[in-house]
Amino acid sequence: MVSDGAKSGANGNARMKVIAPLLLFAISALHAADTQLPAGVRSALDLRHVPAETLSIYVADLDSGQIVLNWRGDVPRNPASTMKVLTTLAALDILGPTYRWRTDVFVQGDLKAGRLEGDLLIKGHGDPFMVTERVWQMLRNIRRAGINEISGDLLIDDSWFEVDDYDPAAFDRQPLRAYNVAPNALLMNFKVVRYHFEPDLLTNTVVVSLEPPLKNLRVQNRLHLVAGRCRGFQRGITITTNMPLDEVTFSGNFPGGCTQYSLDRSALSHNDYVYGLFRSLWLESGGVFSGGWRNVVIEKSLQPILSFESLPLGEIIASVNKHSNNVMARNLLLTLAAEVNGYPGTEESGIQVISKWLVDNKLESDEIVIENGAGLSRKVRITAKHMGALLKYAWRQPYMPEYLASLSLAGLDGTLKERFTDAGLVGRARLKTGSIDHVTAIAGYLQSRTGRRFAVVVLQNHPDIHRGPGEEVQDALLRWLYEQ
């Protein structure tokens, strides 16, 4: 005779025999993404002899929430410029897509019959997109305010941000590169000059012109025109400069086969650049000005004659993300600091603002290291899973369309214009790219052939991975995902 308890135990054992395999299957299915890479991704790694352990992938279905692929998603890695995904997302959430920066203009002196007997003052509040065309518009507004002639100086107030001593050569010993420009509250044209080089076959010389033209930047042209095809690093041009970058010398042999060639390089100090651009455009517009410049802090009681507003944040972040503009991202970080924690905005304060935002939205993680908001760093860290959580958070927000529109479209624009131009991927992915020496990354969204939408993150850190193998891995993953 078997007791009820024994029957119960027997039935329980029988049930356990059925449940155990199901449980094991469920656990196996749950971790399958952690143990298997798509065949194309594995082939790309094997072909270049890149260890799979250097790679992190996180893919989630945005509609079902299903984790499609999670390969080493918890490993902290350097994300390079994909860190801008976080900076721009936090800015949208905190400041809102319609936030605008302002640049205030003041007068110090008497204005009579179009002549300012005194100084013109300009105070910046961090507008990251005061390109030449926008500066021209601001000067037109000043002219419409009745000022045609300025007898005094240009006074510059960039105190809204406080930037520590900054060495533009510290990251990679390339102080003239535009991506190494420091943030500034009165940033104009990214502090960059485009140099145009054209051969003059009649005089057998190379003509060098500047855009914008800056009279306070001295250019020494020692280039020689030689016969040859238009090729070679910098087309044979060697650039040397002094500090504080107010003189640049071009030397070397320039091939006559180049009908035109251009180089973008930073120049001058921030304030020297503002003065040079202001003076050039002011005179070009028919205004009169022969003064110098001084750095000041404007009294709070002084009222501006006009406030020139920036483009809205929702448009600004498109330039940050699509073109991976580092100095714009850094200005954005300091703007968050000044607006949330108060004047002056600092890098440390901006990091505190974003860190608090992460906590408030339950997105915090111990492994994250932000540093400057642009990702131009050897110290910055995040996991693919954490980056994926940010993308999923953005997908649920009311400003999701503005955020998606800031990312590069595969095969169409931004840093993806020349990538994913085949295999049906054109326009199917919106991604932020990231690349520095030994780092390559992508983060964003993809719509598959069947209409499924995914958040996708790929982070890879390995010697020379930025020289091509990393992109091959990304290509293989996105082609696989497109077919899902």
Image: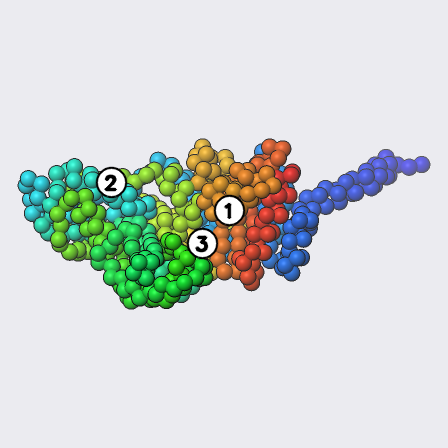
State the count of labels: 3
> The residue under label 3 is which amino acid type?
Gly
Q: Gap in Å between the C-alphas at discs 1 and 2?
A: 33 Å
> Looking at the image, which is closer to me, 204 or 443?
204
> Looking at the image, which is closer to me, 195 or 302?
195
User: Any mark on residue 418, and which?
Assistant: 1
> Looking at the image, which is closer to me, 457 or 424?
424
Residue sticking out furthest to the front: 202
Dot 2 crowding, Cα within 10 Å, few <14, some 14–19, many 20+: few
Q: Is 461 above or below relative to 114?
A: below
The residue labelled by disc 3 is 375
> The residue under label 2 is which amino acid type?
Gln
Q: Gap in Å between the C-alphas at discs 3 and 2?
A: 32 Å
SS state under label 1: loop
Q: Is 435 above or below relative to 29?
A: below
In this rendering, would 82 be left or right of 73?
left
What residue is drawn where x is 50% and y is 35%?
Answer: 396
Quarter in which the C terminus is drawn = top right
> The residue under label 1 is which amino acid type?
Glu
Q: Position of residue 452 (x, y in %)?
A: 60, 34
What residue is drawn where x is 12% and y is 38%?
Answer: 146
Camera-nearest label, 3 or 2? 2
Q: Position of residue 234 (x, y in %)?
A: 41, 60
Dot 3 crowding, Cα within 10 Å, few <14, some 14–19, many 20+: many
Question: Considering only order in the chain, which callout, 3 or 1, is on the residue closer to the N terminus?
Answer: 3
Q: Gap in Å between the C-alphas at discs 1 and 3?
A: 22 Å
The residue labelled by disc 2 is 137
What residue is drawn where x is 67% and y is 52%?
Answer: 42
Quarter in which the N terminus is drawn = top right
